Amino acid sequence: MQQLNPSEISEIIKKRIDNLDVTSQAQNEGTVVSVFDGIVRIHGLADVMYGEMIEFEGGKYGLALNLERDSVGAVVLGDYKSIAEGQTAKCTGRILEVPTGEALLGRVVDALGNPIDGKGPIETATKAPVERVAPGVISRQGVDQPLETGYKSVDSMVPVGRGQRELIIGDRQTGKSAMAIDAIINQKGTGVKCVYVAIGQKQSSIANVVRKLEEHGAMEHTIIVAAGASDPASMLYLAPYAGCAMGEYFLDKGEDALIVYDDLTKQAWAYRQISLLLKRPPGREAYPGDVFYLHSRLLERACRVNPTYVERESGVKGQTGSLTALPIIETQGGDVSAFVPTNVISITDGQIFLETSLFNAGVRPAMNAGISVSRVGGAAQTKIIKKLGGGIRLALAQYRELAAFAQFASDLDDATRAQLEFGQRVTELMKQKQYAPMSTGEMGLSIFAATEGFLDDVEVNKIGDFEAALISYANSEFAELMAKINVKGDYSKDIAASLKELVEKFKSTQAW
Amino acid sequence: MAELTTLARPYAKAAFAEAVEQNALVQWSDMLSIAAQFAADDELEKVLVHPALTAEQQATALTDLCGDKLNQSGKNFLMILGENKRLTLLPQIVEAFEELKAAQEHAVDVTVTSAFELTDAQQETLSQALKNKLQCDVRLTGEVDQTLVGGAIIRAGDLVIDGSVRGKLAKLAEAMNS
């Protein structure tokens, strides 16, 4: 028996026949001269525009990237096996668009917006071009709202604001993706929509991410754009732009969105492949001349926009919109001075360095607090974390300096010893398990306990247990206080006193 | 093909300029097309690319074949092509030359592929309509292709106007499948 297709409903078929435009139009046509490695050279097509879609025989599409005197170089979007020399290629007069809208939430799509999760077609009313010029200076607004990642170390030392671009950089296997995914999970219930763009990853890794997000109830507010390792380079190159267009839909509507590009190194590789095959001259590390622009134009689209812009774009009044970007870059052997890492470091508003040595020493997240920075997030931090977290960064910086020095000294004075011990405890406290993002209140409480010296009499290897017990005690016995901190994030003398009372009560009555 | 066109362009331009100077466009067009027909021949192509033969020998072989169809400047042109080892480019040169000639004459070659033979009246209406649209003289050539089912496809250079039933059916199929 033949399978019935969901598109074969007579009402839909009727609508499609009604909408069919059969007037003959003048089109530009050319002939395929050569096909190799996903690149097609076309003779003719005199009126083709840069970035225009080109239609091949059999419903295949390409993207015109090289306009030369006698030929046009195009990349094929998808499989190019059926395209042969001598076939005709037509201009379409359109630029590449992807579907956008709420219907995409909870779905896994490819770089062109087609569903690949087997959950049926996606009905969206709107489409947006994948390439768009970022909002200009007049439309921008300062970053002053926090985007909480749920990690103590990140939110206290390198805070991320809504509309910021914060790079996550590190070697392979240092927990880069894990950090980004936890940030997505932590957006549950905050109204922040998330887009996770997987570029050049194994299909199994993508499936894993989807499963983890589903397990933690984070798939409802997330769109996954996947261009796997076996997809053509053109898809890997386009996926971040497509994901960005889907995120911009929420930005334009005056909502907040978070986009994770995992990872941009692979996109740069794909673009390098396309450029070399199009015979563009190679530059440093064989990347083409415009590899900086490749990333700068993408990341510039992540921003915070003012209500005037939102009203103009979508008619929603009195709302600011934001698109926060967490690009990921993988380094080779910790070399951050390679071409693509330096480019993206200079484009973004700060970076989180993850290090293999820290990861292997059990410090997870393996963030190097010394060289990780956030250039704009400070203005967006909640009051309580800002007030309490300032000491953490300083303590860790002093600890690192002393720890290196203390290895050679046999006896140390009391002040140095105290600093070393405090540093050890803070390092221990900053460790956090995967898939366990913390709320502002929990974070504030932990940091409060450390900075106020409540950890000084706790053994270093018991810090984790102490913290877990303290938080569960606070959540059950002081639920009101925790809720108050979570909602406003304020810090006052009253709150400090209540926190002090909480920790003292806990230490005197509970075991850990 | 694209690269060949690039290589052929300067020769075509030079030949065209020479032809305009001598006021012998038609004669040059004839000379080049005859030479190109010979050059495209498989047997002669072997001679034209043979490594043991000198450039002069190759050029002479071609000019001899053309006989008295070539005047002195035509022979010189082939000699230069021979020296530069570009005799095999002749078909592309002719193509580029004809394009330049058409541009000069403000005319365009149009091929109309129709499902059925066009009547003279139809051809006349079509030429008139195309003349208005393209803003230049139209040289119409008709072709018949029954697989179009009905209607016609008009080609003028890169521009294609598809008014065939086959094209419309393809559009319908695409709309139904999307």
Image: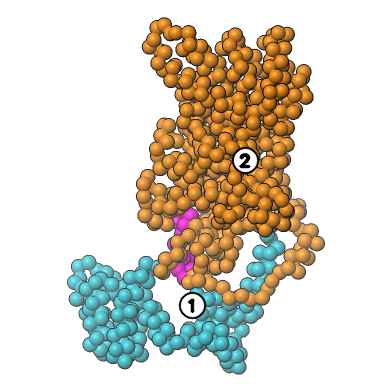
Chain colours: A orange, B cyan
Query: Where does residue A111 sit, x and y in percent of width and height?
Result: 59, 50
SS state under label 2: loop
Extreme residue toward the right, this view? A11
Is residue B70 among the parts visible in the rendering? yes
User: Is A40 colored magenta in this rendering?
Assistant: yes
Q: Which residue is mark 1?
A: B157
Q: Which residue is mark 2?
A: A144
Query: Where does residue A252 sit, x and y in percent of width and height?
Result: 66, 52
Q: Chain of mark 1?
A: B
Extreme residue toward the front, this view? A493
Residue A494 left/right relative to A346:
right
* Mark 1 residue type: Gly
- Residue A8 in which image quadrant: bottom right
* Mark 2 residue type: Asp
Distance between the alpha carbons at the discs numbered 1 and 2: 58 Å
Residue A139 left/right relative to A372:
right
Total labels drawn: 2
- Segment colored magenta: A30-44
SS state under label 1: loop
Is residue A151 among the parts visible in the rendering? no
Q: Main secondary structure of the magenta part?
A: strand
